[in-house]
Image (cartoon, rainbow, N blue to C red):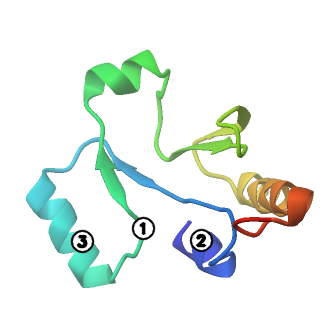
Amino acid sequence: MARLAAEHQGRSLQVLAINVDSPPAAVEAFIANTKLLLPVYFMDERTQSALGIDRLPFTILLDGEGRVVRVYPGYSREGMQDLKRQVKNLLGKGGGREGT
């Protein structure tokens, strides 16, 4: 996901990391060790359950209006390829650059 964000840096794409099971100190150490540049948010079990997140990783692609485009529960190579295609398609609409 960090690579996807880097590939589209400067475009209208925001990638967020959500932590659901590690204590904040462990996450901060991970961020420092990996030099992760994504913003990281913490989600409690109640919110995770309310959103129907039942496996990890769990990726949700939203359009510029905040509407769900696709949901990717779990990980698969095919899912990541589709995610990249969907992102390119969304960024292609309207120019994909901030302010355009």
Eyeballing the image, is 77 above or below 35?
Answer: above
In this rendering, position of residue 55 left or right of residue 42 = right
Labelled pair 1, 2 in contact (Cβ < 8 Å): yes
Eyeballing the image, is 96 above or below 48?
Answer: below
Considering only order in the chain, which callout, 3 or 2, is on the residue closer to the N terminus?
Answer: 2
Secondary structure of residue under mark 3? helix
Please name the residue that numbered disc 1 is placed on.
38
Depth check, front residue: 59 or 66:
66
Of tags 2 and 3, the one toward the viewer is: 2
- Residue type indicated by callout 2: Ala
- Residue type indicated by callout 3: Phe
The disc label shown at residue 5, or none: 2
Considering only order in the chain, which callout, 1 or 3, is on the residue closer to the N terminus?
Answer: 3
Disc 3 from disc 1: Cα separation: 12 Å
Secondary structure of residue under mark 2? helix
Write the residue at 13% across / 50% down.
Answer: 23
Residue at the left extreme, as displayed: 25
Label 1 Cα neighbours within 10 Å, binned few <14 / some 14-19 / many ≥20: some
Please name the residue that numbered disc 3 is placed on.
30
Label 3 Cα neighbours within 10 Å, binned few <14 / some 14-19 / many ≥20: few
The quarter holding residue 87 reads: bottom right
In this rendering, position of residue 14 left or right of residue 47 = right
Residue at the front extreme, as displayed: 99
The quarter holding residue 73 reads: top right
Labelled pair 3, 1 in contact (Cβ < 8 Å): no
In the picture, the quarter occupied by the C terminus is bottom right
